[in-house]
Amino acid sequence: MYQYNPKSLIADEFINDGEIRETLAYAEEHKNDRELIEQILEKARPKKQDKGYVCSGLTHREASVLLASDLPEVNEKIFQIANEIKLAYYGNRIVMFAPLYLSNYCVNGCLYCPYHLKNKHIPRKKLTQEELREEVIALQDLGHKRLAIEAGEDPVNNPIEYILECIHTIYSIHHKNGDIRRVNVNIAATTVENYRKLHEAGIGTYILFQETYHKESYLKLHPTGPKHDYNYHTEAMDRAMEGGIDDVGLGVLFGLELYKYEFAGILMHAEHLEAVHGVGPHTISVPRLKRADDIDPDEFDNGISDEIFEKIVACIRLAVPYTGMIISTRENEKVREKVLHLGISQISGGSRTSVGGYAGYTPEERPHDTEQFDVSDQRSLDEVVKWLMENGHVPSFCTACYREGRTGDRFMALCKSGQILNCCHPNALMTLAEYLEDYASPETKEIGYALIEKELEKIPREKTKEIAKQNIADIRSSNRRDFRF
């Protein structure tokens, strides 16, 4: 019998089934304990200090009590505190990114993914470097600066050498005023040596979704292929950090297993990273199972309502206040709008989930033959940027922290003390000005500059404010770009 130990490097110990079951039982027992719940909420609430805010965060057990509670007034407080934490750490900034699919060749048998090996009617495609170049230029012409590259697991068609070559190609393309300044990587679990190669290639965050933390379900859902190895997959983030990667991103695919189990599991994973490496997850993603070629989500009986989904987002924000939280175009506009106020700090825009989905297509067109999942929010990047600004958010294309060496524990130290806002807010405004000047529609541009003028006055340091104003003036009057604090 494995014993729960967050400092262990063994998956069955830091994601311990017995501990999760005890946590869920405890949460069910105390879900209407008003005194305990008030204590937990008070612990989670951001505390004002001289130089910003600090948040204690919550343990997986404390957060599970909040998630289980069915007291109406508790949900209202959870949502309020989640918004307070998000504003304290990240302000009203929303970081923009786009996925870029390199290849849908895959040797795994995952039952929820159309790329599984037995799917013989989906076209298999792998980008050549010239095709990749066309995709990147198309993304640059939309205004993107940050990509998350995706590829199936196939040691023959998608070896690490191919991924590294693609990263090099992406970073090498300078088109008009466009540059991809940060490449995040979402590929299968691999070796310390390969993670070291990815680190040396200059990647941003290494992202790997657990899919499900329920080991028995995991093994059934991954019946064949290297991904069948639960422990190797679950222990990947430790190998990534051993290989020098500072920032890692967690995620589960909600709908595969009971959501309360997954919720406790992902928080335990965050606690494990903090306990072992001193740095928790840089990001946490919250995808939900969606329809795709050869995949019917109705075949899975663990789907969750929008209301439960929104509460999960808010409770994660209370538990892991420092992490970036990502919502993708799996979710529709209505859901995305709601969770932006509950802790989400990064969203994709104008996304395509097919291999070769950007080049040669208008913003209204999208190929479906190689999509990994149906895209619910099909708006263009310009439409998403305009929508965000109209709702009081600042779309940010900033990548400064990663290129200034503010990663890993250095980023977390700034974030946990509330100081990250002092550089991130002006950086967001300057990169938004770049977008407005180079890519935005006239209406979006007009709304954007009015927002920038208003937001500049919120910068607390007078010198920083003056520099930001001058840099934005230079962006508008010349081709000078990439200013950063």
Image: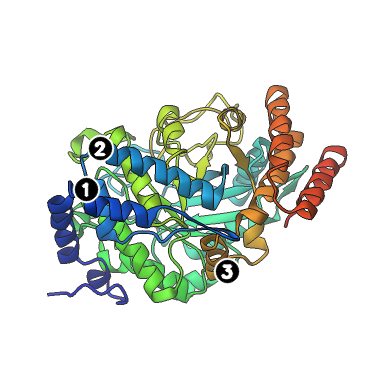
Q: Earlier in the sequence, mark 1 or mark 3?
A: 1
Distance from Cα at disc 2 to Cα at disc 3: 36 Å
Q: Quadrant of residue 380?
A: top right
Q: Quadrant of residue 455?
A: top right
Task: Locate residue 457, reporting x and y percent.
Answer: 72, 41
Give SS at disc 2. loop
Residue visible at 32% across and 57% down? Answer: 266
Amino acid under disc 3 = Arg
Amino acid under disc 2 = Ile
Q: Which mark is drawn over residue 34? A: 1
Give SS at disc 1. helix
Amino acid under disc 1 = Arg
Up the image or down, 399 lies above or below 276; here it is: above
Q: Are marks 1 and 2 in contact (CB under 8 Å)?
A: no
Count up the numbered dots: 3
Q: Nearer the viewer, mark 1 or mark 3?
A: 1
Residue position marked by numbered label 3 in the rendering: 410
Q: Earlier in the sequence, mark 2 or mark 3?
A: 2
Up the image or down, 330 lies above or below 174; here it is: above
Residue visible at 57% across and 49% down? Answer: 147
- Quadrant into which the C terminus falls: bottom right
**Callout 1: 10 Å neighbours few (<14), some, many (20+)?**
few
Distance from Cα at disc 1 to Cα at disc 3: 38 Å
In the rendered view, does 466 fall on the left or right side of 372? Answer: right
